[in-house]
Amino acid sequence: MSKPLSVLQRATRADVRSEPFPHIILRDALPLDLYQELADTFPAPEALEIDTRRNNTRWDYEAHRIRSNEAVPQIWRDFIAYHVSQAFFAEIAELFYDDIHKLYPDYYPNYERLKNMKAGIRFPGFSSTWLEKLKSHSTSKEKRYGRATSRRIKTRMRRNRPG
C-alpha cells in the first residue's frame, strides 16, 4: 500500500463530535485521486456474489473473503485490509478515546488499555453464522415477548458485552 488509504487521514480531534453520540463528519475525507480510483473500480455485484434480484437489502461481504477474491480490484482489497487493521484501530482510538473513556471509564481507564486492544480480520465465517443465530433468536424472542421487549433485550445484551 503505497498511498494513505484511511478515511480518517484528514481527521483531527477537533472534528469529533460527542452529541448525540461520538461521531465524526468529514468533507472530502479522501484525496480526490484516491476517491476517483475507488469509484472507478468499485467491484461489480457479481464479484461479491450479490444477488441483485433482491430489492432493498443490505449487501454483506466479509473482509476475510476480500483477500482471496481476485475479482475484487487490488485497490479495494488494500482499502478494506487497511480499515480492519491495527493501524486503523489506532486512528480510531486516538480520535475517540476521550468519548470512549467517558462512556466506559471502568473498562477503559486509560488510553493504553484501549490502544492495546487487538484489531484485524477475525473468525472467518463467524459473522454470517453469528448474525443468523442472532436473527433467529431475536425472532423467537419477538414472538414470545413482543418486538419492544425484544429491542430492550438486545440493547441490554449490547451494553453488557465487553468491548
Image: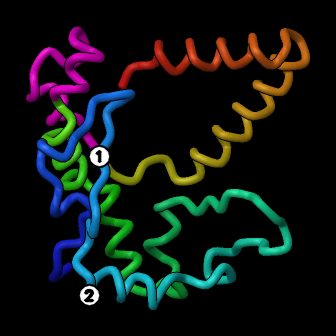
| 125 relative position to 25: left or right | right
The image shows a total of numbered marks equal to: 2
Which amino acid type is marked by label 1? Ile
Find numbered disc 1 in the image and state the secondary structure of the residue it sits on. Answer: strand
Find numbered disc 2 in the image and state the secondary structure of the residue it sits on. Answer: helix
Disc 2/disc 1 C-alpha distance (Å): 22 Å
> Mark 2 — residue?
33
Farthest residue to the right: give it: 143
Above or below 147: residue 52: below
Above or below 163: residue 131: below
Q: Which mark is residue 24?
A: 1
- Count neighbours of disc 1 (C-alpha within 10 A) and say few if under 14, some if 14 to 19, many if 20 or more: some
Q: Earlier in the sequence, mark 2 or mark 1?
A: 1
> Residue 153 is drawn in which quadrant?
top right
| 63 relative position to 130: left or right | left
**Rendered residue at 32%/40% (across/down):** 23
Q: Quadrant of the N terminus?
A: bottom left
> Residue 107 is drawn in which quadrant?
top left
**Rendered residue at 39%/82% (across/down):** 38
Q: Position of residue 120 (x, y in %)?
A: 33, 51
- Count neighbours of disc 2 (C-alpha within 10 A) and say few if under 14, some if 14 to 19, many if 20 or more: few
Q: In terms of depth relative to the viewer, which is nearer, 140 or 145?
A: 145
Which amino acid type is marked by label 2? Asp
Q: In terms of depth relative to the viewer, which is nearer, 134 or 57?
A: 57
Q: Position of residue 138 (x, y in %)?
A: 76, 25
Residue span colored magenta: 98-119
